[in-house]
Amino acid sequence: MFAPPLLLVFFLVGAPPLSAQIWQAAPEFKSELRIEKLDQVLIPALKEYGVDLWLVFDRDADDERVNMVWEETRRPHLDPVGEYIGSEEIYQPAAFLFTAAGERIAIVSTEDLELIEPTGIYSKILTYRYTKQRGFEDIFPLIRDEVHRLDPSKIALNWSEYEPMADGLTVGMYRLLSDVVGERYVQRFTSAEDIVVSLMGRNTDRELAWLQESAEISLALMREAMCIIRPGITTERDIFNYIRFRMKQIGVEPGWSEFRSPIVTVQGPTSGRIPGDEIVMPGRLVKINGGVRVNGYAVDLNMNAYILRPGETQAPPVLQHMWDTVVRSTLAGTEAIRVGVEASVPDSVAREVVVAEGYEAWGYEFGHSVGTWIHGIGPTLAPPWSHFGRKTEMLIQANDTYAVEPVVARFVPEMDQVVRVHVQEMVVVRPDGPHFMVPPQTELLLIPSGGR
C-alpha cells in the first residue's frame, strides 16, 4: 500500500488552513484599520493622482460554493486588493467603486451581500441575482448606471506591467467592463498602480505606532544578543536561539521567515543567511538583521559589531573606513527623504557618497518601504530600474516608512577576506522631515576578544 511521506502527511493533516492573506495585519484590527486607510490614505491618493474613480471589478476563480468541502480551507483567487476593500471572500462577480469625493459603492450578488454588508465600508450597496440562466449579466446595467452617473474624467483600474499587487484585473473582466461602460469611458481608463501602491504602502498613525513598538523591541533584543557573545564559543545559532527565546518571553513573533528571523551573520567561511555553526572569532564582523512582529507589522533593523583581536583597540583601518562611509551614506540619503521628493532622489544621494570613496555602488535599493510586509510596495528609494516599475518615480509622502540600507564591500587584509559592511536603519517621514525610529548605529560596536 502506498504510504505518503511524513512531510506530505504533515502538510495535509497538520498544516494550518489556507486562507487568502495578502495584508498581514492582526485580524482583530483589520475592520477598523481598513476603514482608516480608505479614509486617510485612499481619498488623498485619488486626489493626488487626479483620479475621480477607482473601480475594482473582481470574481473568484470558483463561483460555485458547493465545491467548498470545508469552508475554512477555501483559498479565494481574487484581486490582491481584496483585504483592503473588504471583498476578500466574495464568490461571484462584483464591482467596487471609490470616488475622490468619498463615495464607496459595492455592486455584488445577493449571495455575497452577507460578506460585504458587515464590513461597514460601503455607503451604497447594489445587488443583482446570479443565476444559471443569466450568469452575472444583471450586474452590467448596475455598473453602467453608476459609472454614467458619476461621469468620472479618469477611471483607475487594477492593471500594471511591473507591480503584481496592482494587476488584479483579468483580461476577460477588462473586456467585459469595456463593453459595459462604452467607448466614451474606456478612453478614460488608466492604471491604478499609483493608487494601489499608495493604499498599501502608506501607514496610518495606528500602523506607525505598531512599527515604532517593533523598532524599540527589535533594537533592545539585538543589544541584548550582542552582550551574550563570547568569542571562540558563541555561534550564529546561539545568537539566533537567544533572540528567539526572548521573543517568546516577550510575546512577539519573528518579523519574517521562520528560519531566517533574525538573520545572524558572522563573516567567515561557512556563514550564510540561515544561522549555523559559524563561531564568533576575534577579527570577525558580526551582523544581526532582525525585526519582531507587532499586530502584524515589523521593522527591518541591523546591528553590527567587530570582535577585537588580542592587542587591538579599534577595528582595522580599512574596515573602519568602510563603516564610516556606509554611515555617511545612510545619513546623507536619509536627510533627502522628505515629503514631495521623488523616491529616486535619496538613493542617488546615498550612492554618491559611496562611489566618491571608490567603492562600487550596491545592486539593490537604498530604501524599501516597511509595513505589514517587511519589503513593502510603497514608493521605493532606488534608481529607475524596471523591477520597481513606477515606484521610484512616486513622491514621498508623510507617514511613509523606510528601511534604509547601503552597503560596501572590500578586501580587508587583516581579516583576509572580502567583507561586506551593511547598515540598516528605520526612518519615518514627517511633515518636517525624516526621523529615525530608534537611534541609528553610527559607531561600530567593538567587542573585546574576551567578551563583554
Image (cartoon, grey):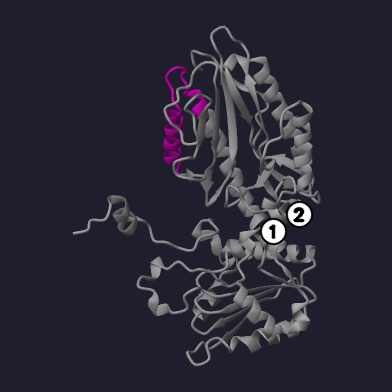
Residue 313 sits in which quadrant? Answer: top right
Q: Which residue is mark 2?
A: 394
Question: Residue 149 placed where, x, y %?
Answer: 74, 85
- Structural distance between the alpha carbons of marks 2 and 1: 9 Å
**Residue occupying the point 49% across, 76% down:** 91
Question: Residue 249 placed where, x, y %?
Answer: 42, 39
Q: Which residue is mark 1?
A: 198
- Say above or below: 360 vs 212: above
Number of numbered discs on residues: 2
Q: Nearer the viewer, residue 412 or 280?
A: 412
Q: Residue furthest top?
A: 311
Q: Nearer the viewer, residue 293 or 318?
A: 318
- Say above or below: 418 vs 251: above
Question: Residue 447 placed where, x, y %?
Answer: 55, 18
**Residue occupying the point 67% across, 85% down:** 180
Note whether residue 128 is visible: yes
Residue 278 sits in which quadrant? Answer: top left
Q: Nearer the viewer, residue 178 or 63?
A: 178
Note whether residue 204 is visible: no
Q: Secondary structure at mark 2?
A: loop
- Say above or below: 55 vs 358: below
Question: Residue 188 placed where, x, y %?
Answer: 77, 75
Residue 184 sits in which quadrant? Answer: bottom right
Span of residues in magenta: 224-251
**Residue occupying the point 58% across, 48% down:** 210
Give the amino acid type for the residue marked by disc 2 in the picture. Met
Check whether the beta carbons of the residues at disc 2 and disc 1 lie within 8 A of each other.
Answer: yes
User: Which numbered disc, 2 or 1, marks the residue that appears first in the sequence?
Assistant: 1
In the image, is 232 to the left or to the right of 309? left
Q: Residue furthest front?
A: 1
